[in-house]
Amino acid sequence: MKIRRHHRKETSSSHHEAAAGSESVGIIQSLRGLMVEVQIIDSRPEEKELLIVEEYPDVFLEVSFFRNNTVVCINLTNSQVLRCGQKILRSKTKVTVPVGPKTAGRVFDALGHPLDNGPDIKENRRVISEARGTKSYRGNQKLELLETGLKVIDFLTPFVKGRKIGIVGGAGVGKTVLTMEMIHNVTRNAKSMSVYCGVGERIREGNELYETLKETDVLKNTVMFFGQMDSTPAIRSMVSNAAATAAEYFRDDEGRDILFFVDNIYRHIQALTELSTNLGLIPSEGGYSPSVFSELRRLEDRLSSTEKGTITSVQAVYIPADDLSDPAVQAIQQQLDSVLVLSRSIAESGIRPAVDLLRTTSSLLTPQIVGDRHYQLAGRVQAIMQKYDSLKNIIAIVGENELSPVDRSDYQNAKKLIQFFSQDFAVAEHLTGKPGEYFTLDQTLDGIEAILEGKDVATAVAKKPVKASESDKKK
């Protein structure tokens, strides 16, 4: 399958009912980029309503906000047929996407168009701008750990049903590959539904992910939405809400547990920022519009659990210029329960996944959730890695042989831990030639314990890690 770059139509066929007999709004007063300012002469439209250009019934504008006696709209697909003076009509509809069983195994854009050459789904559609069932519910239910088979994630950032985990890193450090491996490992045996949202990423990556999910038989329980880098910022900013609408349906109407993957949530903020610039809004700190962060919080609130089902979210987070202090990165991290930080220096040393063991944090790493043994081992690993970080500068000056026996032992153990957390990925097998590895949590804990106590890791783990493909059969 090749995910198509462009839309067949300007908007979904379900939005096409209009033109003849529609109420008039007014005429186009000015155009700038994606912004279309319409002078209100007759009927006043609703916020987020789609407006129709009279001569071109397939071209829709989305109402953004009102200014005096005008309505500021967004030219969703950057149509070039718009001119000042054109008459604008109401459609009394909003952007919708299909939801339900028929969407399983399908790929859509933010407007609900199929991108996989499959048939258009016209029935059972929902408005993407209206959140449903967003009252967060955790109650007294027992927290359930989801095993990913990835040593460093299961150990440092436990994957808990109904919570959010972020994979944070700069360009080229392995965020997308790690996300793909998690999709491959977590969803293949789960009875839950998966929703994947690609925001502002490369078209090639979307194709590769689609083919990978198809080959591993995961696609049949996955719904995919893409607003890729060739799309307008309007489409890229909407695709996350489109995917959240699909996830809400499976959670609330079917009572399913949803695995929600976003690659890349920073691109969502980037698209909103581009859009606000198009609309002439004044930016604040870091060049971001203040409304961008409230939009992010609204989206994150939709990815919550209710009494009917759960949404467990994995979000890749791009770091501009490798700067963790960027305001947008900070705003995203505040919404996450766990943050897995990928390091460029570690990636360059050949360790994959390139996880920074010191800067990776999780509020879920508690004895109540992971148990005493796991929690205590995590504390010991963090202490050794902090010591390793401080010893590196000393060793660069005086050499490792000048360290005390205790310091030398801790330094060697830290290097063994870094190497232990390195792992071959199933989704990269065609590139590396090495079969993907799947480690159970018990294997991971046994291996770490062996390193800390100076024992042989291979013996302590008891058996070799099963290949990702073989573990499917066993489970």
Image: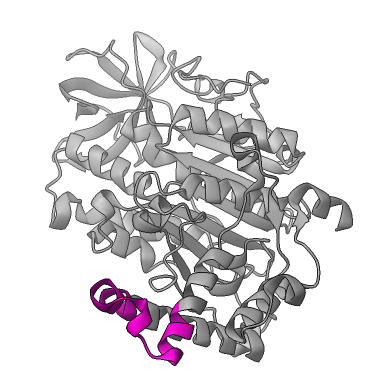
Name the foreground residue: 143 vs 404. 404
The quadrant in which residue 404 appears is bottom left
Q: In which quarter of the image is the N terminus?
A: top right
- Relative to residue 360, is residue 291 drawn left or right? left
Q: Does the magenta stretch include residue 392?
A: yes
Q: Does the magenta stretch include residue 267?
A: no
Which residue is at a point 39% across and 51% down the rendered structure image? 348
Residue 128 shows in the view: no
Tell me residue 187's x, y (percent).
71, 52
- Relative to residue 265, is residue 35 drawn left or right? left
Check the image and report above or below for 110 versus 162. above
Check the image and report above or below for 139 versus 235. below
The quadrant in which residue 237 appears is top left
- Relative to residue 119, is residue 277 drawn left or right? left
Q: In which quarter of the image is the C terminus?
A: bottom right
Tell me residue 446's x, y (percent).
70, 78
Which residue is at a point 15% across and 44% down the rendered structure image? 281
